[in-house]
Amino acid sequence: MRVKKIKEKKKVITDDPVKDFEKWKKKYVEKKTRVKKDKKPTSRKHKYETERQNIQKLVKKYSEINPKEAVKFSDFPISRNTLRGLLEAQYRQPTEIQRQTIGFALQGRDVLGAAKTGSGKTLAFLIPVLECLYREQWSAVDGLGALVISPTRELAYQTFQVLRKVGKNHDFSAGLVIGGKDLKDESDKIHRTNIIICTPGRLLQHMDETSTFHASNLHMLVLDEADRILDMGFADTLNAIVENLPKTRQTLLFSATQTKSVKDLARLSLKNPEYVSVHEQAKFSTPATLEQNYVVCELHQKVDMLFSFMRSHLHKKIIIFFACCKEVQYLFRVFCRLRPGISVLALHGRQHQMKRVEVYNDFIRKTAAVLFATDIAARGLDFPAVNWVLQFDCPEDANTYIHRVGRTARYKEGGEALLLLLSSEEKGMIAQLQEKKVPINKIQVNPEKLICVQQKLEAFLAQEKEQKERAQRCFVSYLRSVFLMKNKDVFDVFQLKLPEYAMSLGLAVAPRVRFLSKAQQQMSEGLQNDSIPAGDESEDELKSFKSQLKGKQAESVLTQSEDDDSEDDEEEGEKPAALLCGSDDEEDDEKDLDLLTVKRKDVFSVNEDSETIEELNAEEKRNKQKESKVKEAKKIQKRNFKVNTKTIFTDNGKALQEWPPLQRTMNPFGDQEEDDDDDKETSGINVEAAKERLRKEDQEFDKKEYRRKIKEKHREKRLKEKAARIEASKQRKEEAAKEDEGDNDDDEDDDDGEEEVVAYLSGVEEEFDPCTLPDPDKVPNSDSSDGEDSDASVRGRKRNFNDGSSDDDDVQQRQVVRKKPRQESTGTPLDTGLSLAEDEELILFVFWG
Ligand SMILES: Nc1ncnc2c1ncn2[C@@H]1O[C@H](COP(=O)(O)OP(=O)(O)OP(=O)(O)O)[C@@H](O)[C@H]1O
């Protein structure tokens, strides 16, 4: 029976295989869709439910967290996705700060965390961020759930990379929001981003400008390196950001160093926070694996010392910290040219963002290299396997020192740090470091081992003007950075030996530093004022006042210049390139001092009669303002600056200048030349062209005048001659009449005209003026502009030739012309006083008119 059925089946198949296949396919598809339909809801539901159940289980365990017992990450109630991410990134055991903070953060508490550099603070906040959103089963439609604010772009970028690594098994979207990136692109995506890592300025910009962006759902806010954010003057920005965030959020604050401002911030923005200071009881505030030394040297020895250091550490990874961008810019270039035998990189706030990222990644990859950097690299950056940190310039304070040296000896690794100090800085700085529990030893440098590079630098500067300008800017910039330092016990710009320092940079002479000379002058003036008998004030009071004055002076300048000179902050990188030009230093210097003068007077009320003095000051200020504007204008004119021009382009790419509006020169003659000039000269009065035009006009006028005077003389002469001739002919007639009466002589064919012709042509005593000739290029009719017909114009020409005499004379002259051939027939050569060519022309003219 069974065999029979199979046979039948086979028979069916063999009958029409295509039809059979179609049937089978139809059945298969129907079955598949039915199964899918049945399965799908249950699997989704299942997944969701499993997830919910897992979350509930984890949340239940939160209360049981015991940091002391947590040896592995898996000892914490954290999601499988996060654990997998941690394991894949080779993170197995939590560090101390992670152990102590993760528990509190999971429980939803606000945390203020402090731990040494390189101790793993990044994961201490990233793990809670991931867990928080996981707990809420966050998705793209929920928008922003967590926000991490960093002080610098590099640190934000680094944190973003760690987040991508650890959170890769989650479905959250994450975004890096920092300056220097495409704002529009960010704006398009930001509203769909669940976790944002950002710098404060850029975030606030989105809050202000991106309509789709809001943070009303935010669950967690993290401030990394909170003290630095506040130090950099972002307090206002931060306040504005925090105002836009919901109050129900959880907040975490982290830094290796805590300042009073952070505590104030914590007091204001954290709710019942948990203070976790892991290494508070530790003997030292820097990593135990870090060896720290300092050297005392002269300012002019520093460059040689740096070069010698690099030459003796060719296979190491080194970071060198400088006080300002311009130092980095100059020394980086000259050190590259010195070819120290190790690759040199530079990282500072004035670089383009792309360049910054490129240098950052380059230095991460390299095993031996030297990175010249400002303090933008001091915080949080985790370059692997850095062997040395050399501080070329003394750090601002002990905290900055701790963060700088913290770029080496990270997470159980070893490292070395060397600090170069000037003798004037030693006492104050070492005292600060001791207070902060920094173990540092003084070492000596063998002067014989020092390699002198001064001559080479001089040679470079002699070859390249640009390099010399960089050196000058470096010089001024360094002095300004020292001048602006708050701690006057450590930083005293007046103790620096400037000529020697300039020479060590390769400069033949020290550039003029206006702010220093002015400051010195002001201080001496201040001291002189102080030396005037001060009534009841005791000497001690005077002394304290002087020191206060010194301190405040710098402080006031500093407050003002935070905007100008905070070269290392993220905003600095976005300053226009024009600020780099040499004169800006001078401008800045002046700016600093203007403020300084005013502030000093206001703050300390040096003068007794404050009201009148205030009035006087205001008056003085007004006068000064007027004066300075004139000065400014003169300066601009002298230096040939192009100020505030804005060029717009048409669709065809033709440049149009929109502002300032063009001052087009009026061309009274409307000649083509002016139009041509327009292309060259876009605006203003072309003085040279105007002069040329006036000169031509004068020439033309003089010629006309000269011609007129000659004509006048000729006319007068002719009139006299005519009168004489008339007189003579009268006499002849009278005599003839007498003779007729007597002799009846009929010799009457003597013609006046004949004499007249001769008299006329040879009678011109003055030099013949060729200008009186008619213009041969002129078409006879062209004179019709005078309103005369063509005959008249011909007449006019003849009149010209005949010295422009009156109509009466015309008749006579026509007679003269008619009689001319008769005179020629005599064959006597006639001296006209003209050249041969002119004679020919004259004859042609006489004959052919
Ligand atoms: N649990 C861990 N296991 C292994 N390595 C870790 C762990 N946590 C952090 N690290 C590593 O330690 C190094 C320092 O970490 P991190 O950058 O978070 O330190 P930090 O405390 O933030 O330093 P800084 O104060 O300088 O910002 C990094 O290379 C990181 O990969």
Image: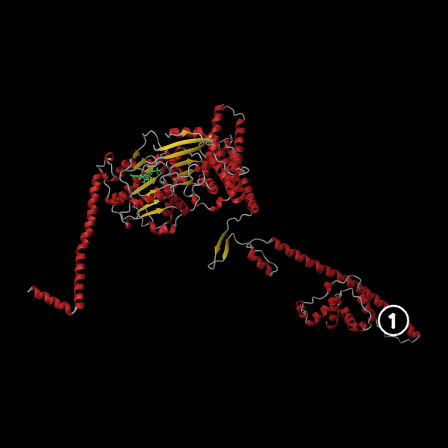
Kindly tell me whether residue 322 is visible in this rendering.
no
Q: In this view, does 628 lie above or below 729?
A: above
Q: For the point 25% across and 47% down, which residue is it?
A: 137
Tell me: is circle 1 under 8 Å from ligand 1: no
Q: In this view, does 590 lie above or below 446?
A: below
Secondary structure state at the residue bearing disc 1: helix
Kindly tell me whether residue 547 is visible in this rendering.
yes
Q: Is residue 496 above or below residue 18?
A: above
Residue tagged by mark 1? 733
Location of ligand 1 given as a quarter of the image: top left
> Is 799 on the left-hand or right-hand side of 391?
right
Percent position of residue 453, x then y: 50, 37
- Determine the image quadrant of residue 567: top left
> Is 419 on the left-hand or right-hand side of 792?
left
Depth check: give the residue in front, 726 or 464: 464
Depth check: give the residue in front, 759 or 316: 316
Mark 1 nearby-residue class (10 Å; few <14, some 14–19, many ≥20):
some
Q: Residue reaching furthest right?
A: 742
Q: For the point 71% across and 59% down, which residue is it?
A: 703
Percent position of residue 728, x then y: 86, 67
- Determine the image quadrant of residue 369: top left
Q: For the point 87% across and 71% down, which residue is it?
A: 733
Quadrant showing the C terminus: bottom right
Q: Which amino acid does label 1 sit on?
A: Lys
